[in-house]
Image (cartoon, rainbow, N blue to C red):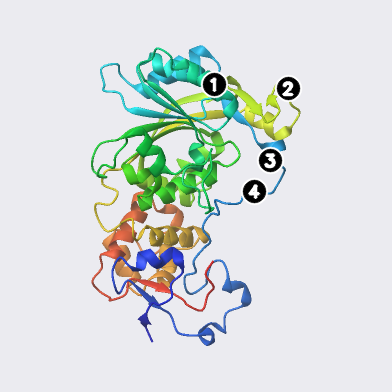
Amino acid sequence: MWIPVAGLPLRLRLSALAGAGRFCILGSGAATRKHLPARNRRGLADSSPQLLPEPDFRNPPRKASRSSLDFKRYVTDRRLAETLAQIVCGKPNRPPHLLLECNPGPGILTEALLEAGATVVALESDKTFIPHLESLGKNRDGKLRVIHCDFFRIDPRSGGAIKPPAMSSEGLFKNLGVEEVPWTAGVPLKVFGMFPSRSEKRALWKLAHDLYSCTSIYKFGRIEINMFIGEKEFQKLMADPRNPSLYYVLSVVWQVACEIKVLHMEPWSSFDVYTRSGRLENTKRKEVLELLQQNLYLIQMTPRRNLFANSLTPMNYNTFFHLLKHCFGRRSATVMDHLRSLTPLDAADILMQIGKKEDEKVVNMYPEDFKRLFETIESSEDCTYKWLYDDTLEDM
């Protein structure tokens, strides 16, 4: 018997509030799942959807000590700094955006940005660089502000008191005089920096949740992100059915959300690398040597103005993420197989509406196909309930 969903996990509670009758519960009580092996009680279900775990932004990986793995990259070459400043600032006759520069370090790039006409807010997490950065702002007519802040720790999800270099976006933007603008308005400001070398994927997930929910920095509008990213994560981010081995959930999430442009490519060796002990001169660490042989890509991620033009909203985006995680959990399966576990609607009819065949494989679906699939289900009037949820499974 189908009954309205109750006691949804916290992650889907907001989505359920978007409209009555969007979810239903499959069965009631553990008896309906007794026939399933224990292995199916967690992870991906064979016959009904399970909530897959969201990334935990609070606890860093424990594969090795922070001191042995953590390092930062800085632009110290003047010519490279001038090239990047021209790329980020654009044509001289364009009105300048407020630019948040993440962890500028020695300030070589900061100077180049100022000379290119940018108004810069330097968000520096390392206090030792702050006096020098502040000195760069002399005689600049207020074009440079320096704040002790780690951009990637804005609005941390760990709870408790927020202490520098962590910071709330509300406090930061109020201090800068930045006001909220409608999503359909222009880009209110730009962010420039480098994704943390050891946690690019985690940073991408946090920003994705903030973007789709229109919270944190994205509460203020379509913030443009300009970031250097490592070669491996870049290849995954840009992948689609033409690169099936690299294609995964974040590929779809970010390509649906943003127009992504590659602005520049630079070898790792062009940047100075600093660890907690200082500048990294010579190293025999295999993983660092491998990184130094790769390239870094400067990508521009501009949120799409029409992202929420149809049925995808900040209230139901978590359901969209769940659909993607469910599908890529069994990449070799057909979309039809997944839909039978995700929705009580006629899966064949849904696929026909988006122009796909019943034997369509997950890895053959482009990002825009997944968005149309989700929005077709959301806007369907064929059934009171749009999505299935099994209350016998633990909140993961």
| Secondary-structure class at tag 2 | loop
Nearer the camera: disc 2 or disc 1: 1
Q: Earlier in the sequence, mark 3 or mark 1?
A: 3
Whether residue 206 is situated above or below residue 348 in the rendered picture: above
Q: Earlier in the sequence, mark 4 or mark 3?
A: 4
The residue carrying mark 2 is 282
Labelled disc at residue 61: 4
Residue 82: x percent and y percent? Answer: 44, 15
Above or below 380: residue 147: above
| Amino acid type, residue under disc 3 in the picture | Arg
Q: Residue at x 25, y 68 (%)?
A: 380
Question: Which residue matches tag 1?
Answer: 131
Mark 1 element type: helix
Quadrant of the rendered image containing residue 272: top right
- Residue at 37% across, 55% down: 370
Measuring from the top left, give residue 257's x and y in whole percent. Answer: 36, 46
Q: Which residue is mark 3?
A: 66
Q: Position of residue 45 (x, y in %)?
A: 52, 71
